[in-house]
Structures are given as C-alpha cells and as structure tokens.
Image: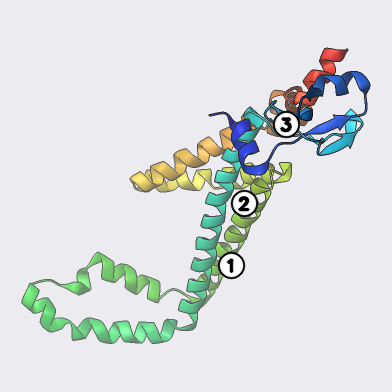
Amino acid sequence: MDWSLRACGRRGHATYAPAEPDLRERLVATTPEGEAWRCLRCGDFVLGAAAGSGPAAEAPLVLRDRALRDAVVLRLLAVERFLRGLVLLGLAYGVLRFRAAQSDLRATFERAVPALQPLQEALHVDLTDSAAVARAQKILESRPHTLTLLSVGLLAYGLLQLLEGVGLFLLKRWGEYVAAVGTSIFLPLEVRELLDRVTVLRIGALVINVAAVLYLVLTKRLFGVRGGHAAFEAARRQESLLEVQQAATG
C-alpha cells in the first residue's frame, strides 16, 4: 500500500513554494494548464498555486511513507486505549453502584438461595456448594472500603488509558511515553494472572501489550534507545521530500 497516496486521497495534496530560488525550481513545473507544484507527501505534481510559501525552514513537516504507516498504527493503538478506558470507567461506575446497593443485593441473594431448594432437589444439585454461588457470596460480602478502593483504582486506570489514547491519536511524543510506561507497569500483573490460569484472552492481551511496548520504544526511539529523540527527528526529516530536494541543490 502506498501510504502517501492514500493520505493525499483522503486529505488532499500538500504543496509548498519555498523562497529559495534553487529549491523552488526543483518543486515547480510549467505545463500548458499553468504551473504545477510537487506534493510534499506523495511527490506528484499538482496543478495550481502552492498551498503555502515561505522559507524552506518554515515549511510544514509532512508525514510520508513509513511515518504515515506508523501514524496509522499509533491511532489504532489509541482507539484500543479509548475503548479500554471507557470499559474501565464503566466498571468503576458499576462498582460504586454495587457498593450503594450492596446490603439490598446481599439480602436478596440470601433469600433467593433457600427459595431454590425445590429446584435443587429436582435437579439433584446443591447450589450452596457451587463455586459460582460461593464466588457471588464472597463478592457480596466485600467490605465497602475495599469496593471504594477498587472503584478508585478502576477510575484511575481508565483515565490513564484515555490519556494514552489522546496522546497517541494526536501523535504526541508525551503520549508515546505515557503509553509505554503505563503499559509496562501492568505487564507483571498480566504475567502473574497467566501463571494462575492460562486462557486465550490472557495470552492475547499479554502478547499485544508486549508488542505495543516494543514497537513504541524501538520505532519511536524512546528512553534514548537507538539515538533517542534527536535521532528520531533526524530520521523523520531525512524522509521529508523538501529536505531531500534541498540536499540535492547543495
């Protein structure tokens, strides 16, 4: 897939007329229909006046090729973080609602189990020894303070996920750091859960999160990896069409 052409098809071409004569000549062509300027994203010549003009140093840094692909990956991660954050906020709200109605739910549960005695005898089962019933009873007997701490933890984690999503979607470097750190913090917990019980969902979540951290750290050169931020910016500018053309005039 040509990511540059795809982006130009969605957003339109990005043309710029640099003030430097030598560089300007390399980006403009004369046609029977008038002048055409080379798109800084896809490299095609586009009829009409340039969308912007000024010194080459003030030209917008247009994402192209690999940088565009990376932007798509980051925004997919952002969507996943948004969805996860909303789910966590919903769980936090649910725990608070449960805490408010805990005593009523516990009383209803204690009345319901004995009322099911005829059904238990007909089916030859003992619900009082059921793992599901025992787990439900344990939840209903949770201390209000514990439920409050749980809701606060879910709320904080949900807000962290939303913050990661905003930073990643806007392609901000702070968002990449927040996502890398926030995801790494919970990796030991995911490993612990996997050691307790192996499920496809837990394996998938661990693999996705480990891959996300490695992708962010290596491709975005976080924490000084592969030259750090300076090397990342230099590599991105080397891929800029304007920078390439400027180097060719030297």
At a point 90% along the width and 18% down the height, the residue shown is 22
User: Mark 2: which amino acid?
Assistant: Gly
Answer with mark 1 or mark 3, whichever residue precedes in sequence.
3
Q: Nearer the viewer, mark 2 or mark 1?
A: 2
At a point 51% along the width and 67% down the height, the residue shown is 90
Residue 216 visible in rendering? no
Answer with mark 2 or mark 1, whichever residue precedes in sequence.
1
Corner quadrant of residue 134: bottom left
Disc ID at residue 46: 3
Q: Is residue 193 above or below residue 244?
A: below
Q: Spatial distance from mark 3 to mark 2, Cα to Cα?
A: 35 Å
Q: Nearer the viewer, mark 3 or mark 2?
A: 3
- In the displayed structure, does residue 234 sit left or right of residue 84? right
Disc ID at residue 165: 2
Disc ID at residue 152: 1
Corner quadrant of residue 116: bottom left
The residue lying toward the viewer, choosing from 112 and 94, is: 94
